[in-house]
Amino acid sequence: MIFAFHRFLFVMALALFSCGGEGTEKKDNAPDSIPAVSVTENTRKLNDSTSPASEGVAENTQNVLPAPGGEKPVLPAGSVPDKQKGVQKVLTPKKFLKKTINPGADFLVSEKLSLLSGKRVAVATNHTALLTNGKHLVDELMSTGVNLVKVFSPEHGFRGTADAGEKVASSKDPQTGLMLVSLYGNNKKPTAEQLKDIDVVVFDIQDVGTRHYTYISTLAYIMEACAENNKEVIVLDRPNPNGWYVDGPMMQAAYTSFIGMHKIPVVHGMTIGEYAKMVNEEGWLKGGKKCTLSVIPCSGYRHSMKWEQTGLQWIPPSPNLGTEYAAYLYPVLCWYEATPVSVGRGTEIAFTITGAPWFKEFPNLKGKTEAYQLRWENYDFTPVSIPGKAKTPPFMNEKCQGIRFTNRTDGKSLFLAGLMLLEGYYQAHTKAATGKSFFTSGLEKWAGNTTLQQQITKGESPEVIYESWQKETEAFRNMRKKYLMYAE
């Protein structure tokens, strides 16, 4: 084990001084097996303002395993000890290379494989589960002799190449012989039968920090199934690209679905490990059950960090979030999924553009190309079929007039601009007189309520709409504090 850890540090040190190539591109007809990916400079040094690797990791329960070397996790002010002994743990890593982010998977492999010793293991994961040495978690666990029984895959599949909403079938991985069990479609929650031959589920998937993104729903279902069947859950944490703010309307209970299971805002500002703790402790699992949960944090992360400060390579967590910039815009563009506006599916820059064949201009902006410091340029595009990304995108082979975003702003301004543009598209659609409704069924699931549609159709200002959800969002911010493992 000591040799393995020293070897890991040696590989990490080499990575810091190397410049890699591009990731291997998957052929459209490639089997749903372990991805072959080479990592490009995913451990480069950060600027001097970044915290040392061990800073910011904290624990809010009394059941914390002692950190290697005797380091003690720090409890945040106002934290509530876990009353159910042994249910929830946070494992604090040793210091890795300073000013480098290391995901929880690094810590598991280098220091905590004993957690899996003698156990039958399933991994819930996809193509994003890379260690900082560029190796996939599944490959690494198999090479160390862990008794890996099966892989649970989320929406978009194990390789992350299935379209949004596309059915992903269970199959056998021809490369490793492992059973790949799809947790999408009609089988979103692991069954007792699928869990009977395992003892622990290790969860490692890169999230983007929004309520709409279904990986947190998959996590919740896994936790629920494990609670019901007395199985352990270990969550390997990763940085949240949108973890630097909290905003957006809250989900109302009447409109919950797989794209929004819990009463949280659109942007929750938590890592997936922190979110797992909240789901467990707030009684959000069926029947108020709790699973036996351990969270292995990433090192060196702070919530104030933007993705480029983490030094990690952006690996698209789903086919149409090709860049971190798309993930930044995603929270305010998802609403268009329930409208006749394209978000660029069928192009290589989805979720950085919007438009439609019927669109000409925004009546409420009078030719402006900026709102609340968010800027854009006029942009025409024609969606086409792209296997592995969007086989049948909206407005396929039709020319769309629209806009392309060109900069960034703070979270509040992003939402205000998003509301201004949503109103602009609504007004432009009304003026175009297409004879069809602008809002289609399902918007309430994306927005979490029916209020947003009413506010847009009434022409309420972005400021009024924005303020309408602030009271509930502020209450969530306060509740969130006791589950944070990293400094703000």
Image (cartoon, helix red, strand yellow):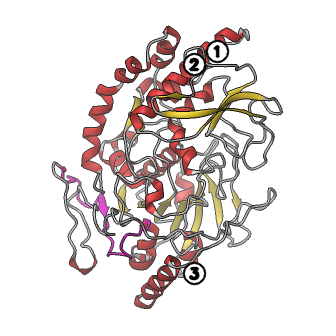
Q: Which residue is mark 3?
A: 143
- In the rendered structure, which amino acid carries the disc numbered 3? Ser
> Which quarter of the rendering shows the N terminus?
bottom left
Q: Is residue 18 above or below residue 280?
A: below
Tags 2 and 1 touching, CB below 8 Å: yes
Q: Is residue 480 above or below residue 354?
A: below
Residue 238 in sight in this render: no
Residue kind at label 1, given as amino acid type = Ala
Residue placed furthest toward the bottom: 3
Q: Is residue 272 magenta?
A: no
Q: Earlier in the sequence, mark 3 or mark 1?
A: 3
Rendered view: 354 above or below 180: above
- Taking the spot 52% from the left edge, 78% from the top edge, the residue there is 15
In this picture, which residue range is highlighted in magenta?
79-103
Q: Marks 3 and 1, how far apart in space?
A: 57 Å
Residue at mark 1: 428
Badge number at residue 424: 2
- In the image, 27: left or right of 487? right
On the image, the x and y values in percent for residue 300 come to 35, 65
The answer to whether the residues at label 3 and label 1 have Cβ atoms under 8 Å apart is: no
Question: Which comes sooner in the sequence, label 3 or label 2?
Answer: 3
Label 3 vs label 2: CA separation?
54 Å
Report the number of numbered marks: 3
Q: Is residue 401 above or below residue 308?
A: above
Q: Quadrant of the rendered structure where residue 283 is?
A: top left
Q: Of discs 3 and 1, which sits in the foreground?
A: 1
> Closer to the camera: disc 3 or disc 2?
2
